[in-house]
Image: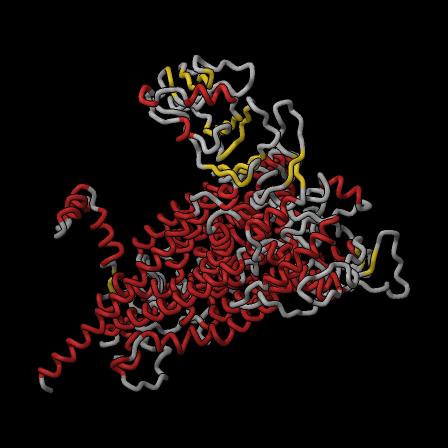
């Protein structure tokens, strides 16, 4: 028996064996990876939760000067049909003097409709000002009773500890009287 | 401590950890170089498979608990939400519900292997007892898990099983009340079952740890049933058995996957897709298939114990008493034993038929004192728990010196018949308790009990001892015997 | 037969070893060996336990598997086996049949039976787009959340709402149907042995009661329900629902379509499940094959004495 042919057979065998082990190991890794994904993904929002990620609102019953609150993704959304005076007041403000510099046009798609998340940007309380009898703060918009933040008629922070304006959620008008939030 | 004679690891991180807590040394010792008999067959894969199933069940169960609501008004709906809305919820639930069945399949084969090859025998008695304890805990866990979806079978299964305990004299009703936390199966019952269903698997993990610890003290049994003697008889656990177990697990999981993906409800009952209704009982209440043999034993008692049956049982004990003494086969008189057993048989039959007569109102025997003083219900419950309890004492019933059924033809026949018997009991458990199925389950129950309580002690004394191979190595080489 | 005194053989430590002293004998000795040097434990096993298992135990296990379907339901009536597009490992739903089935459900079944676990948004599985689903949902009204004055007003349904039930609660459903509760249909094919076959058989199984059968008022005779007595009158009749795709407007076609639709309602995940299942099972088989080769390779040196 020649030792050289033995050796080449050995090498062949080793390559074959290594290939086999490598295949098995990588198949195991792929299997483990595919098992992990469902186990992770199950914690993402479920289909019923996602189905509520957009909300459609019928705007037709809201009269000028009225506000409604709708629930969207578990949080209140303020929708206000603003009066002429409110729009004028808001547009008359010099943006550069504001804490969070946003113009009224930046915050609205249609001037009379103001849509924003009703959560104070300070510590997450819900500001007052949606009902006619509510305290509306020094700027005629909203007032957060927790720590005294005052928001104007465009929901911008004017006074008090809150750092930012009330957040405008993504929304679009499907037609003149239907609004989709989200 | 063992860490004293530790060998150093090359990897500095592993070495750093291991010098402080020798987990790697332990893994190396118990799963790396651990000497394992070289002659295992594929029956020895089922321990690893059962372990794999336990992990699968705990993982999928923890995930289901994230979405499940343990309240009688919401449980069914929350399960349906898992099935329809949760991402991959259907997959995880089907893995869990079919996983219970496949866990039991693995464990039943594992138990069969233990009996067939005598793995319960000295010095592995405690190892076996831990195993039976795991089995018992699994049954409790599986039962409570089946209640959680709060379908019709969940509800009525819970009703029937909690009712077992009402058979206990005097305190039975109070125990049932205590178990249910109310006058009927209701929200409190569901809540406690959920809590325990979540807890018990971790208790199982603890007992599994003891089971494996005990295994690593005595070492594994093997198909020949003889202890490894030299290094030639064993192989290191890794890579030989790690790779063989991985292969076995993959084959098992492939079959399991076929059920999960293509027949996810084949092992379940359609009625459990009907929400629980305390006012409507399903036509047939059937437990999960893995409980059927025990359910059949429960229902086999359509008769109670009267004076004749008691006397028959007493006489049986007297007849078999010599088997449990130190007497040798030669010192035991078979004719006397046979005579006493025959007499006991006659008494038992008299008792049985006189009970049937009372039931049916016939007047063929008209024996005096044939009324039962232990009713059928209590007998059934005792027999059912006895069927499990007998497994606990199996190591002490069997004193035959040969382990493996390979070298015990009588025992082998008995065990194989036991398998057939258990299959028959399973079928009986699924059928309504009427007609032909009643006597069939009674005979099958008699064999089950008889094999363990009488057959095994009898064979311990009287089965001839075959010659065994000198060593595992020698047996493996077969052809080249000395 | 030798009755050996077993106790005399007992030894404080072991059980089996002592017995081997009397002689050497294994069960493998009759195997013809091609090459004794590669003979290993597996052939010993083949000869012994495995064959025994296959010969005696397996037939019983197969028998058990064979009877197990019958176990689910004691005295079941034989249902005719229909052919469904969703049968088998590669089966899928037929979207046209699902849409027709939805129409049958909406126009006929929905008068009494709820389908509360299916949401309008789920209808995208049937091939409807968002606008179509909104339109379908808008035909129904649901009670809104209480408003600021505490009044509960109705609003039109949205895609995120479940199918609107015909009755406000179970008691109302029972009362309106002579005390017989029309079950929710969301899971009906999973909750009845036979599934779609059962629904189809039930829908087409209405016949005049055979002579001598007494039916009470509000009872009907059906070939395929256990006991043959059902409280639901035959719901379908020819031409009851108009189809736009030219499918025959017959009881048979309606029954098939509604059974198809209800199977989807019970198992909306089925197509996804089967698609995934084929991949998973194939992968596992290949992986097991590779592992078998690995195991053989590793064990190869054990064969040598």
Image x and y of residue C151, in percent: 67, 26
Q: Residue at x 55, y 70 (%)?
A: C62
Q: Please report the residue visible at 51 percent of the width from the left and 24 percent of the height from the top.
A: A82
Residue closest to the eye, C295 or B228:
C295
> Eyeballing the image, is C1 above or below B65?
below
In the orientation shown, which residue stands out farthest toward the left? A3
Measured as percent of width and height from the top left, residue B351 is found at 71, 56
Q: Nearer the viewer, residue B324 or A124?
A: A124
Q: Relative to residue C96, is residue C22 drawn left or right? A: left
Classify residue A145 as left or right of residue C290.
right
Viewed as shown, does residue B183 lie left or right of B468? right
Q: Position of residue B198 (x, y in %)?
A: 47, 42
Which color scheme is applied? secondary structure
Q: On the image, which quarter does residue C9 sit in?
A: bottom left
In this view, the residue in front, C154 or B69, is C154
The answer to whether residue B187 is seen in the rendering is yes
Q: Nearer the viewer, residue C5 or C231?
A: C231
Screen quadrant of the C terminus of chain B: bottom left
Residue under the point 54% across and 49% down:
B84
Is there any visible trace of residue B346 in the rendered image? no
Q: Is residue B318 above or below residue A59?
A: below
Check the picture and name the quadrant holding the N terminus of chain B. top left
Q: How many marks?
A: 0
Image spot of residue B169 (x, y percent) = 65, 40
Residue drawn where x is 84% and y is 54% of the image: C219
């Amino acid at each position: 028996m020649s030792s050289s042919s033995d050796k080449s057979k050995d090498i062949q065998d080793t390559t074959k064996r290594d290939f086999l082990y490598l295949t098995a190991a990588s198949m195991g890794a792929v299997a483990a990876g595919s098992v992990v994904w469902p186990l992770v993904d199950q914690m993402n929002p479920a289909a019923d939760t996602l189905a509520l990620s957009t909300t459609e609102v019928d705007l037709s019953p809201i009269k000028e000067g009225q506000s409604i609150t709708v629930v969207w993704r578990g949080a209140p959304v303020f929708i206000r049909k603003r009066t002429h005076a409110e729009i004028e007041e808001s547009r008359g403000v010099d943006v550069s003097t504001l804490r969070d510099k946003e113009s009224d046009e930046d915050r609205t798609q249609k001037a009379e409709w103001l849509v924003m998340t009703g959560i104070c940007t300070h510590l997450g309380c819900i500001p007052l000002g949606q009902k006619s009898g509510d305290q509306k703060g020094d700027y005629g918009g909203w007032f957060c009773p927790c720590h005294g933040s005052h928001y104007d008629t465009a929901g911008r922070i004017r006074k008090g500890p809150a750092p930012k304006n009330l957040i405008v959620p993504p929304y679009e008008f499907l037609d003149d009287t239907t609004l989709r939030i989200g | 401590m063992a860490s004293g004679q530790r060998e150093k690891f090359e990897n500095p991180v592993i070495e750093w950890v291991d010098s402080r807590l020798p987990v790697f040394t332990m893994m190396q010792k118990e799963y790396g170089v651990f000497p394992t008999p070289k002659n295992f067959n594929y029956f020895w894969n089922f321990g690893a498979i059962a372990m794999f199933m336990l992990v699968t069940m705990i993982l999928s169960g923890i995930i289901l608990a994230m979405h499940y609501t343990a309240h009688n008004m919401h449980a069914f709906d929350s399960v349906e939400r898992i099935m329809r809305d949760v991402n991959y919820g259907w997959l995880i639930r089907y893995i869990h519900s079919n996983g219970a069945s496949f866990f039991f399949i693995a464990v039943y084969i594992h138990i069969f292997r233990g009996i067939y090859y005598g793995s319960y025998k000295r010095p592995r008695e405690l190892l076996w007892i831990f195993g039976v304890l795991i089995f018992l805990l699994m049954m409790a866990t599986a039962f409570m898990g089946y209640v959680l979806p709060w379908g019709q079978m969940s509800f009525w299964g819970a009703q029937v099983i909690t009712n077992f305990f009402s058979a206990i004299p005097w305190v039975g009703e109070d125990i049932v009340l205590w178990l249910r936390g109310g006058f009927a199966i209701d929200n409190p019952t569901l809540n406690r079952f959920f809590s325990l269903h979540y807890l018990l698997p971790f208790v199982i993990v603890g007992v599994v740890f003891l089971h494996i610890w005990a295994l690593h003290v005595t070492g594994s049994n093997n198909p020949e049933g003889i202890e490894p003697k030299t290094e030639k008889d064993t192989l290191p656990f890794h890579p030989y058995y790690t790779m063989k177990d991985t292969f076995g697990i993959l084959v098992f999981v492939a079959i399991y996957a076929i059920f999960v993906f293509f027949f996810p409800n084949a092992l379940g009952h359609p009625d459990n897709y009907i929400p629980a209704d305390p006012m409507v009982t399903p036509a047939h209440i059937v437990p999960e298939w893995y409980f059927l043999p025990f359910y059949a034993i429960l229902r086999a008692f359509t008769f109670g114990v009267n004076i004749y049956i008691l006397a028959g049982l007493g006489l049986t004990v007297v007849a078999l008493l010599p088997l449990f003494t130190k007497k040798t086969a030669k010192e035991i008189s078979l004719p006397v034993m046979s005579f006493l057993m025959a007499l006991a048989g006659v008494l038992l039959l008299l008792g049985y038929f006189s009970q049937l007569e009372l039931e049916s109102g016939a007047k063929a025997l008209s024996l005096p004192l044939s009324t039962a003083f232990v009713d059928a219900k209590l007998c059934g419950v005792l027999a059912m728990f006895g069927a499990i309890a007998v497994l606990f004492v199996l190591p002490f019933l069997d004193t035959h010196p040969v382990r493996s059924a390979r070298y015990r033809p009588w025992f082998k026949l008995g065990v194989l018949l036991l398998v057939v018997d258990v299959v028959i009991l399973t079928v009986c458990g699924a059928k309504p308790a009427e007609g032909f199925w009643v006597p069939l389950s009674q005979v099958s129950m008699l064999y089950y009990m008889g094999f363990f309580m009488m057959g095994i002690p009898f064979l311990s004394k009287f089965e001839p001892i075959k010659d065994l191979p000198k060593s595992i190595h020698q047996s493996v080489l077969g052809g080249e015997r000395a | 037969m030798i009755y050996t005194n077993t106790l005399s053989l007992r030894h404080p430590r072991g059980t089996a070893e002592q017995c081997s002293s009397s002689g050497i004998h294994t069960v493998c000795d009759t195997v013809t060996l091609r090459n004794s040097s590669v003979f290993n434990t597996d052939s010993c096993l083949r000869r012994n336990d495995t064959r025994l298992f296959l010969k005696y135990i397996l037939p019983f296990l197969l028998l058990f598997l064979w009877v197990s379907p019958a176990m689910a339901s004691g005295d079941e009536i034989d249902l005719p086996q229909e052919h469904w597009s969703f049968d088998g490992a590669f089966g899928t739903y037929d979207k046209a049949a699902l849409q027709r089935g939805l129409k049958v459900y909406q126009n006929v079944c929905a008068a009494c039976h709820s389908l509360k676990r299916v949401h309008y948004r789920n209808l995208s599985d049937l091939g409807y787009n968002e606008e179509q689903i909104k339109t379908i949902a808008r035909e129904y009204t649901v009670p809104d959340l209480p408003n600021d004055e505490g009044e509960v007003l109705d609003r039109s349904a949205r895609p995120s709402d479940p199918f609107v039930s015909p009755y406000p609660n179970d008691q109302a459903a029972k009362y309106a149907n002579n005390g017989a509760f029309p079950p929710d249909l969301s899971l009906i094919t999973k909750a009845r042995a036979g599934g779609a076959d059962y629904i189809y058989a039930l829908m087409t199984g209405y016949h005049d009661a055979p002579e001598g059968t007494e039916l009470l008022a509000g009872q009907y005779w059906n070939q395929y329900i256990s006991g043959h007595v059902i409280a639901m009158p035959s719901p379908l009749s020819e031409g009851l629902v108009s189809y736009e795709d030219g499918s025959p407007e017959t009881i048979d076609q309606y029954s098939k379509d509604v059974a198809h639709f209800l199977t989807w309602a019970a198992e909306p995940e089925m197509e996804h499940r089967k698609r995934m299942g084929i991949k998973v099972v194939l992968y596992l088989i290949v992986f097991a094959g590779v592992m078998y080769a690995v195991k053989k390779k590793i064990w190869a040196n054990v064969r040598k004495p």
